[in-house]
């Protein structure tokens, strides 16, 4: 065999090797992209579950706050307020699983924290058979109205997410999550300080 023929075979084998490496690289990229999509889908499912749980807990809290306003028995008030405390804590836990660090969600977290602390302290008062004062009932009514507003807003957010109007990618990257941010922004810092 001549050296020209040997170089030609080496060149052809080099091209084949390069072609095989390019194919392997392409398959690797496709595989990694598919795996990445699975991870993203799993994370988004987890976020969605946390959002649905948050809405469910807030709905329960809203109902319990409505009941707390009309309760006359200390025993029933203690049970009700303890349940509000527990559900508010669970809502806070669900909220912490959602990857949004926007100030809007910080206000929701602040609200849930204040509601949890307040209902906890009132439940201890009710356990000791002390009646709730008019001021405390007014605060419960205030919490109820704020919870109702948040619940409507979060329900609208879930609807937008479900209809495809808003995605997790958009929600986690946007600086201003338009309607949601606007609704929660209406819960001013001053109104939180009143309670």
Image (cartoon, grey):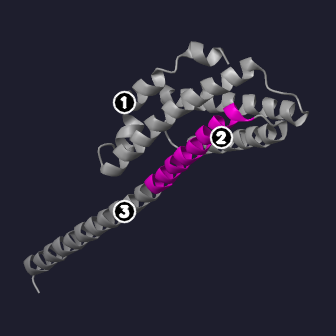
Q: Is residue 65 visible?
A: yes
Instruction: Find the distance from the CA under tag 2 to the CA under tag 3.
Output: 48 Å
184 sits to left or right of 96: left
The quadrant in which residue 138 appears is top right
Vertical placement of residue 147 versus 79, above or below:
above
Instruction: Find the distance from the CA under tag 3 to the CA under tag 1.
Output: 36 Å
Quadrant in which the C terminus is drawn: top right
Report which residue position mark 3 lands on: 32
* Residue at x 28%, y 70% (from the top left corner): 24
Report which residue position mark 2 lands on: 64
Residue 166 x/y as whole percent: 33, 42
Dot placed on the residue nearer the N-terminal end, 2 or 1:
2
Main SS, magenta region, reads: helix
| Residue 112: in magenta span | no
| Region in magenta | 43-71
Label 2 SS: helix
Give me the disc on residue 179.
1
* Residue at x 46%, y 51% (from the top left corner): 48
Vertical placement of residue 72 versus 28, above or below:
above
Residue 83 x/y as whole percent: 73, 44
Q: Residue furthest right?
A: 128
Q: Are marks 3 and 1 in contact (CB under 8 Å)?
A: no
- Residue 111 versus residue 28: which sits nearer the camera? 111
Label 3 SS: helix
Quadrant in which the N terminus is drawn: bottom left
160 sits to left or right of 149: left
Q: Residues within 10 Å of mark 1 (few under 14, many from 20)?
A: few
């Amino acid at each position: 065999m001549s050296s020209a023929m040997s170089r030609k075979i080496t060149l052809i084998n080099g091209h084949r090797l390069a072609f095989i490496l390019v194919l392997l690289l392409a398959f690797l990229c496709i595989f990694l992209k598919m795996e990445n999509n699975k991870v993203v889908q799993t994370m988004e499912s987890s976020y969605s579950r946390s959002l649905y749980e948050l809405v469910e807990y807030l709905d329960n809290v809203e109902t319990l706050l409505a009941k707390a306003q009309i309760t006359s028995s200390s025993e029933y008030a203690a049970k009700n307020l303890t349940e509000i405390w527990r559900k508010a804590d669970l809502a806070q836990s669900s909220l912490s699983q959602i990857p949004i660090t926007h100030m809007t969600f910080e206000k929701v977290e602040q609200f849930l924290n204040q509601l949890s602390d307040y209902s906890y302290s009132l439940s201890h008062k009710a356990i000791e058979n002390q009646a709730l004062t008019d001021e405390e009932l007014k605060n419960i009514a205030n919490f109820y109205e704020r919870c109702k507003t948040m619940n409507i807003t979060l329900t609208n957010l879930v609807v937008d997410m479900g209809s495809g109007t808003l995605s997790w990618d958009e929600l986690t990257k946007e600086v201003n999550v338009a309607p949601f941010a606007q609704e929660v922004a209406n819960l001013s810092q001053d109104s939180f300080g009143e309670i």
